[in-house]
Structure formats: structure tokens, C-alpha cells
Amino acid sequence: MLSADGIEVRFGAVRAVDGVSLEVGDGEIVGLVGPNGSGKTTFLNAVCGVVPARGRLEVAGHPVRLGAPRVVARAGIGRVFQAPQTFEALSCIENVLLASADARARGLLGATVLRPVMWRRERRRWLEAHEALALVGLEGATATPAHMLTYGERRLLDVARAIVSAPRVLLLDEPSAGLNDSETAALGDLLLRVHEERGVPILVIEHKIDFLDRLCDRVVVLDVGRVIATGPPDEIWRDERVMSAYLGATRAEG
Amino acid sequence: MTDATTPGAKPAPPTGDTPAAGPTGGGTAAPYAKRLRPGIYRRHHYLAVVVFVAATAVLAPMFAESRSTQFLVNLWLVYSITGIGFYWVFGLAGRFAFCQTFMMALGGYMGAWVAQSSLEGGFLVQVALAVVASAVVATVVGLLVRRAQAFYFAIATIAVAEMGRVFFSKAEWFTGMNGTRTGIPPIRLFGRDYIAEDEVFWIFLGGLALVLLLAAVIERSPLRRDGVAARDNALVAAVVGVPTGRAQLTLFVLGSAMGGLSGALMGPWTGTTGDTSFGIELAIGIFLMLLLGGIGSMWGPVVGAAFYVAVPDLLSGFDKYATIVYGALLLVTIILMPEGIVGGLGRLRLRLEGRWRRIRPKGAVDAVG
């Protein structure tokens, strides 16, 4: 579904992502792990067009231009950031509506001369947004201003916003960061539910091993901007290269 | 966009009041969707516009006994128009634009030129061409600096305003001798002239009513939330799929066009249009109107413009201390009501209604554990 080929990101002389190729197939949940600074988030940023990058990107077999966030979003990539990125001046449902895939009657014409069309579209968008909010368990908070949500709720709102446009693939950056164990477990349930109900393939950056074991079919390990291993979670944790990348070479050997 | 095309069309509310089905339960979508509409659509924008215009129509003539008071009332109305435009540019789209006064000057000169050149266009033609001219210039400027964010945009628009000033001082065929056009014919509409202050009042009130209606339809549209998202975090908004550039450009062009409109209204009113009426003082004044009135509401600039026009006049009794008292009053207002007068009143109302407690969602926290 998502196919990234030779993605490369340079910050000056530093190759933060050094030719990473990665695929996320239909119905798959793939974990992306690696030590701090290994280029995981930068890879996601490159895919989303947030940082300039080279390489090739395909979504559902169609090439997607790198470096244009909105083009990437339109191509069907939903992104959840590490720190919740809610628009605090808007209500929860408005936050979700921003990501609606239906862009018709959304500008000046929709606001003025095409108002009947705009209303028809809006009503449909409200329904979609409400469904997404219900899926993450925020249906009681549609009218709530986003600045009144807790940290955990904001993360859920971000997930709702990412899935409302029926993305072809969902990218999550450490979704469990800042959550306690029970919250993390509930989030795992939620992601599995999203995966099953919506059939969305997921690529997730994560540090918590239990979480990855439970969710992922496959784990890709990055170190210093390169893929060093890929495979099912239980194999990956035993892989020597992975252990030395995480723990340092001597420790892994001894 | 001209006034004439401003639709007063009410949104057609979905009919029926029985929630037929849940979001996944099938059934007709429309009645259910109505219950889900975001809070902004539940506000009574059109009613507020009607009440405001009616109240102004009744109260202003009673209040404005003298010619000078009526002048101030009219000034308030035109400043409100440019202020609402600036609300779209700065309040909604978050663009630090310093070229609103340039747009006013452009509109003023354009209107005067249309009236006094061989075109001899009538009042509506003057206004329409002034609006179009400022919209076109704003589109070009907006496209050229579309990638500039925050203060870079501010600097770019200051440069545009400066270039405009130089152009206005050189192009005497357009701006008149020494950049001042005089003898602009008075407003002539529907076969009669509007010369006296209390006659001009009705034209300006009509203009403001149309602009308020346009503001109301924009408030009640997806364009508003796209602009707000682009304003608050353009990068995340783009990743999410919001057409950030388009929303910001649209609001900038629309707001600038309102600057052009107010400029074109001022020429036939005062009989002259000169660069001096649109200097840096007014540029800061427009910011002030928005900050004082409240940046979070379309009514902010209307209230702010009233403050900006009325307070210095009311303080004239303080004589040489008037400026100091005015400054102190500004400070006190901004400290006591950081969200502006309208924002402060809104917060007060919420507190009185005890809404803060009621809109806190119950049960939403359970979802994460």
C-alpha cells in the first residue's frame, strides 16, 4: 500500500535518513524502531513532505511527489504526530473536519454563491467526523473546544482526525508517549479496532516492546539512518545487530 | 468581489427534527447531521447583523445631533468596513499585513479616477472598480509572498505599501496633483445626491450591512476553520490536508478588497482623496481597532472602530492631557480584556451562564483508561 524507496534526508553534511526503503502492505501493521536519533521521525517527516527529501514514494501503486504535505495527505497518508497537534481555537469536531477528504465547496464560492452545495457537503462531512470521533471514543466531546481536552484525549482527537479522510495508510509517531500503562493498552485496543474496522495499514514508531508485540506483524529497525533489520517482532528482539544498536556492541557480545 | 454579489442567502437548514438514526445506523442523514453541526453554526450571525443594523439605524440619528458627531458616526462605519476586512486578513488567516491602508488609498484613488476621468463612472461603478483593483493587487501580492510566514509577510507588505506610496506620489495622472485628488463628486445613487452627513450615513450603513452579511456567511463556512487552522499551525494543517495557501490567500484578498471599498466610500464623502489620510497612524489604528475590539469575533473591529473614533473625541475635554488619558485607557482596556472588548464580554457571559462547567465532556476520559 505504502512503498518508500531510497528515501534520503540530509541536514547539511548529516544524512539523517540514508536511503531507507520500506513497504507497508495491505492489512499490515508495521513497527518502526531504533535508538534515539536513528531517523525514525525524520523518515515519517520525509514521507509526509514536511522536510525536503529525495527518493521515491508510492501510495497504492501511484507515485506521490515528495515535499508537498497537502499532496501527500490527498494521496491518502494520515499522520499522527508525537506531541498532539490539536487546533485549540476550534472545537473537536472542527479539528476532525479539517482533514475531511471532501474538498468541494470549501472555499469562497462555497461560503457565498454555492451555499446550498456547501451545506450538503458539510452535513456529510459532519457525519464522517462524528463517526471518526465515535470510533476513538470522543463522541461525547464533539462540541468541546479542543483546548479543554486532556493530553490523552488530544492524542485520540489526532487519531480521529487522521482516520476521517479514510486514509490508505496511517503513520503514527510514538502514539503511547506520555500515556500510562492502562492508557497505552487502551490505545492499542483502539488502533487494532481502527485497523480492523477501517482496514487501514499502519506504520507505527514505538519504543514500548509489549505494545509492538501486540500490534505489529513486522518490525523494521533503523540505526543511523539505515534499515538494519526487518522481520517479525520476536525474531527482531533476538537479532544481534539490533541488540548492539540498542545496547552498544560490547554489551551485546558479553 | 463587489457588494452586489454578496449573497444574503440564508443557509437552508435541514428539515425534520427527529433524529432518525445513529451515525452508522442508516436512515436519512440530514436530520441527524443537524444535531452534529459545529457550535459556530449554532450562533445567530444573521439575526445579530439585522439587530445591529436596525439598532444603528434607529439610535445613530438620535445620538448624532451635531454635524461633527454625525461625521464621527460615518467615520466609524467606514473604519468598521476596513476593520472587518482586516479581521479576515489578520484575525482569521493570521496574516500580519501592513498594507490595509495602502489598499484603502488604492481604492480611494481608483474610485476618484473612475469618477473624474473620461469614464465618468457612477458611484456603484467607482466602488466596484475600487474593490476589483484592490482585490487584483492583493492577489498578485498574496501570490508573490505566499510562502512568507508571520513577520516576513509583515515586512513584505510594508514594502508593498511603501512602493505604493512612491507610485502614488509619481503617478499624478492617477492620484492628482501632489498625490491628492480634490473635487470628487458626491455620492449619487438612485437619482439623488447624498451630500449632508446624515444622508451619507445611510449609504455607509447599507455598505456596512452588506459587509457584515458577507462576514456572517464566512463565519458560517468551512473557509473560516481552514483559515484558523492555517493561522495557528500552517505546517500541521497542510499535513492534515487543509488547503492552507488557498484559504489564507482568499481571506487576504477579500480583506484587502474591503480596504479598497472603504477607501472608495471616503472619497465622494469628503470630496478629496490623499495619501495623507492613509498614513502609518491609520495602519496602526486598524491593528488597534482589532486588538481593542477583539480579534476572535467579526464584531471585534466594529466595536474597536467605535472606540478608536469616539474615545479621542470624548477625551477632548482633557485638553493637553487627552493623549495621555487615551494611552492610559488603551493600556487598561488591553490589560483587563486581553481578548478585546467583545472577547471580554463573551467570557463574562459564559461565566455568568456557568457554561465552563457544562461543556466539559463527561465520560470522554474513560476512553483512554
Image (cartoon, rainbow, N blue to C red):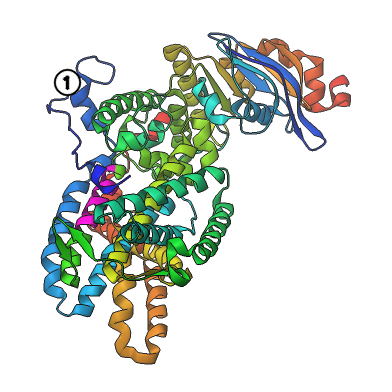
Part of the protein shown in magenta: B206-217
A19, above or below A114, in the image: above
Which residue sits at x=49%, y=31%? B240
Judging depth in this view, the residue of B57 and A244 nearest the camera is B57
Q: Is residue A64 magenta?
A: no
Is residue A175 in sight in this rendering?
Answer: no
Which residue sits at x=25%, y=42%? B5
Disc 1 residue type (three-letter): Ala
A16, above or below B233, in the image: above
Residue B108 in picture, x, y percent from top left: 37, 61
In what quadrant of the picture does the N terminus of chain A appear?
top right
Q: Which residue is mark 1?
A: B20
Q: Quadrant of residue A16?
A: top right
Q: In the image, is A118 to the left or to the right of A254?
A: left
Q: In the image, is A88 to the left or to the right of B42?
A: right
- The main secondary structure of the magenta stretch is helix
Q: Is residue B216 magenta?
A: yes
Helix, strand, or loop for circle 1? loop
